[in-house]
Image (spheres, grey):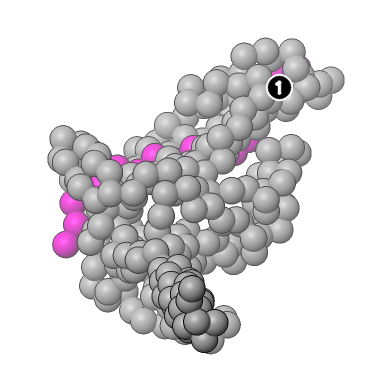
Amino acid sequence: MLNPLTMRSKQLKLITLVLACIVFFGCGRETEEFTSAPLSDYLPVQVGKYITYRLDSTVFTSFGAVTTVRSFQEKHIVDAKITDALGRDSYRVLRFLRDTSATLPWAPAGTYAITPTDKTIELIENNLRVVKLVMPIKQDVTWKPNRYLMEDAYDPLYSFSVVDVGITNWDYTYSAVDGQMTVKGKNYDDVLTVDGIDETLFANRDSFTVTNPSQPVAYASYGQDHYAKGIGLISQQFIFWEYQGPSSTNPDGTKKGFGIRRSIIDHN
């Protein structure tokens, strides 16, 4: 028969061992964190960095009756480190355009700012502030890119009636991390894919056509970005347009909005 003191000693050792295991493995769980690549890996903003794209811009002319695609070469150059309206370190980016055959000189085409923080990268253009990337860079991470926008952010330039409803609640998601992609015959590794809005109503998104012109309204919204590690944005598509059906003043209906496709040509 075991001495009660011996039994108590063994019980105490067992309890101590169990507690040690709980503490050890518990601490292990608490300190286990997902290791993410820094955002700057996918959107470098060093002064002097540039990327050149093929830009295909879809617009609606003749009072919204004609769908027109205009194509250019487009260059983005990180020009200088600046301070944004909130006092944060930012980078001014200059944009230039020229013809697709590169026979004409570059012409200035506006500026925007990129603001990197510990947890996000924001892009500010025409007073529109959008969150392009967030931490951590991990499959299925989702965020609200337009959290700082107003619902009518694109007014008065376009004066949408329905397509921008709910724009502040759009979700963007990392749908692929460390993928591969071919752009204009060149292969890219370590590609980060960001899936954005994808909604249509009585519309063919990519052809910019309306499936039922008799409807009072139709629209298409779509966004997807691809970033290559160490390079930046290599491919982008953003479609945002609506159709307003026939009326007494406009018997053929009208479209308003735009579509943008960017494909990288070269970079430094």
Query: Residue 6: x percent and y percent?
Result: 47, 83
| Rendered position, 88 above or below 140 | below
Query: Residue 92: x percent and y percent?
Result: 39, 73
Q: Residue at x 42, y 32 (%)?
A: 69
Query: Residue 59: x percent and y percent?
Result: 51, 35
Overall secondary structure of the magenta section: strand
User: Given the image, on which type of amino acid does mark 1 rest?
Assistant: Gly
- Magenta-highlighted residues: 251-268
| Rendered position, 114 above or below 206 | below
Image quarter of residue 130: bottom right
Q: Residue at x 25, y 57 (%)?
A: 229
Q: Residue at x 53, y 26 (%)?
A: 205
Image quarter of residue 110: bottom left
Q: Is residue 51 left or right of residue 155?
A: left
Determine the secondary structure under disc 1. Answer: loop
Residue 262 part of the magenta-drawn span: yes
Residue 61 part of the magenta-drawn span: no
Image quarter of residue 202: top right
Q: Which residue is mark 1?
A: 253
Query: Residue 81: x percent and y percent?
Result: 36, 81
Residue 81 can be seen in this image:
yes
Taking depth in this image into account, of 238 and 256 the one nearest to the observer is 238
